[in-house]
């Protein structure tokens, strides 16, 4: 068997390609359920901390409601924009995001790219505050899918089929790593690899790419002491439960105390100054504590179904670009969801990964809703 035989073969699309109406309706319905549940969860997880800071208990909820409204507009607009337009705009989209990433690390831009917790990940442009690294994930998927369509017949040769991707994506990943933002760097790189694998790139080329990737990852981890400390805490959770391992320990307490049916909505005790970032990077343990095993599994099942529908849309896409785009966008949400859950369960090293549609934060919510709109557009298109 050649490495080409390992390529993910999707069924041939018919002239009447397009996902059934129930697929689109179900994806839309699950998205709305997750967003509404997210608003409830954000209020529960943030109200006490907001009041302790002298703010109204619904302060974070109101902010999240505004972000959700913007996200719904993004979803609606993306639903009606022909996804093939992104193929023509792939280069400008990636270039714009690259400029935003450069602005983040320039020495004279701290007024609009302040240091938070030792990193510069946010841009503050007037009333808008957002993470360029979240936009970079989408831009990389769009650009990689567009170029992969053009390079289909050159994947046999490394210098013409693979090297062009490295020359462009490498600097983008370096910019994200310079924030520093290790998890976003790894996820963005994995997204590009996923799209290329789905496009038919040879296995031996992936193995060649893995050779420099290992030392680069080692350097990234060791260049930031807190990242290395988090990995060591993951390998030995009991070693430093009052320091680096504190957040994970409190998350485990929240999950374990939820039992089967949970303590009840709003009744979490871990959100009372015990679990940091309860409304964002560690919202899943609060869900598990308040809704129990049943609620936690239900949320997991909803994300599994959302992912399945996204891949089904990819399988039924009317052209290769639509197929690769849908795969990449689906993996963005799936990686965020399962990465967040894996971190809070102690299955992955602690890092800042928000739960799509649910965690507090504007960039992630608007991006996830926009991605859903693009998938709905791909699902509704027929072969021209």
Image (cartoon, grey):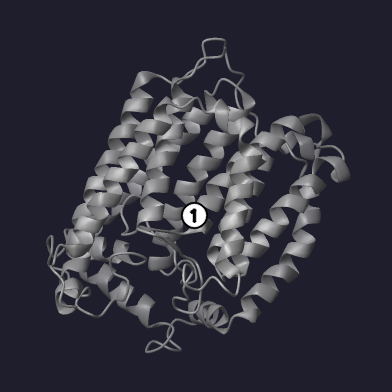
Q: Can residue 41 be seen in the rendering of this structure? A: no
Q: Residue at x 75, y 59 (%)?
A: 210
Q: Secondary structure at mark 1?
A: helix
Quadrant assignment for the C terminus = top right
Where in the figure is residue 298, as x and y percent of width and height? 27, 48
Vertically, is 102 above or below 163?
A: below
Vertically, is 14 above or below 193?
A: above
Q: Quadrant of residue 53?
A: bottom left
Q: Residue at x 51, y 51 (%)?
A: 135
Where in the figure is residue 277, as x and y percent of width and height? 32, 71
Label 1 neighbourhood size at 10 Å, few (<14), some (14-19), many (20+)? Answer: some
Q: Nearer the viewer, residue 291 or 41?
A: 41
Asked whether, in this view, residue 234 is left or right of residue 142, the answer is left
| Residue to which mark 1 is pinned | 134
Q: Residue at x 30, y 38 (%)?
A: 30
Asked whether, in this view, residue 339 is left or right of residue 54, the answer is right
Q: Can residue 75 be seen in the rendering of this structure? A: yes
Q: Residue at x 19, y 56 (%)?
A: 62
């Amino acid at each position: 068997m050649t490495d080409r035989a390992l390529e993910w073969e999707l069924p041939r699309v018919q002239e009447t390609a397009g996902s059934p109406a129930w697929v689109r309706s179900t994806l839309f319905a699950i998205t709305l359920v997750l967003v509404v549940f997210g608003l409830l969860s954000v209020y529960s997880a943030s109200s006490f901390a907001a009041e302790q800071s002298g703010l109204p208990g619904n302060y974070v909820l109101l902010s999240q409601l505004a972000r959700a409204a913007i996200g719904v507009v993004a979803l609606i607009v993306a639903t009606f924009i022909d996804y093939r337009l992104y193929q023509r705009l792939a280069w400008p989209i990636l270039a714009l995001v690259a400029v935003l990433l450069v602005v983040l690390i320039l020495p004279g831009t701290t007024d609009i790219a302040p240091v938070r917790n030792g990193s510069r990940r946010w841009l503050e442009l007037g009333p808008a505050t957002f993470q360029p690294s979240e936009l970079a994930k989408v831009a990389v998927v769009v650009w990689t899918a567009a170029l992969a369509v053009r390079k289909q017949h050159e994947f046999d040769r490394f210098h013409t089929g693979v090297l062009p991707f490295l020359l462009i994506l490498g600097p983008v990943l370096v910019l994200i790593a310079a924030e520093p933002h290790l998890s976003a760097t790894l996820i963005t790189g994995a997204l590009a690899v996923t799209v290329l694998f789905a496009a038919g790139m040879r296995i031996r080329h992936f193995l060649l790419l893995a050779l420099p990737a290992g030392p680069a990852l080692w350097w990234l981890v060791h260049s930031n002491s807190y990242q290395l400390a988090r990995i060591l805490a993951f390998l030995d959770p009991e070693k430093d439960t009052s320091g680096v391992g504190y957040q994970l320990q409190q998350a485990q307490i929240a999950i374990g105390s939820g039992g089967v049916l949970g303590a009840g909505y709003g009744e979490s005790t871990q959100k009372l100054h015990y679990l940091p970032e309860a409304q964002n990077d560690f919202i899943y343990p609060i869900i598990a504590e308040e809704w129990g095993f049943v609620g936690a599994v239900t949320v997991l099942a909803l994300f599994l179904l959302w992912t399945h529908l996204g891949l089904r849309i990819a399988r039924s896409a009317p052209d290769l670009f639509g197929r690769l785009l849908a795969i990449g966008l689906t993996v963005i949400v799936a990686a965020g969801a399962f990465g967040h859950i894996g971190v809070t369960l102690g299955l992955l090293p602690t890092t800042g990964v928000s739960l799509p549609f649910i965690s507090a934060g504007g960039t992630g919510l608007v991006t996830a809703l926009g991605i859903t709109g693009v998938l709905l557009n791909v699902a509704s298109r027929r072969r021209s």
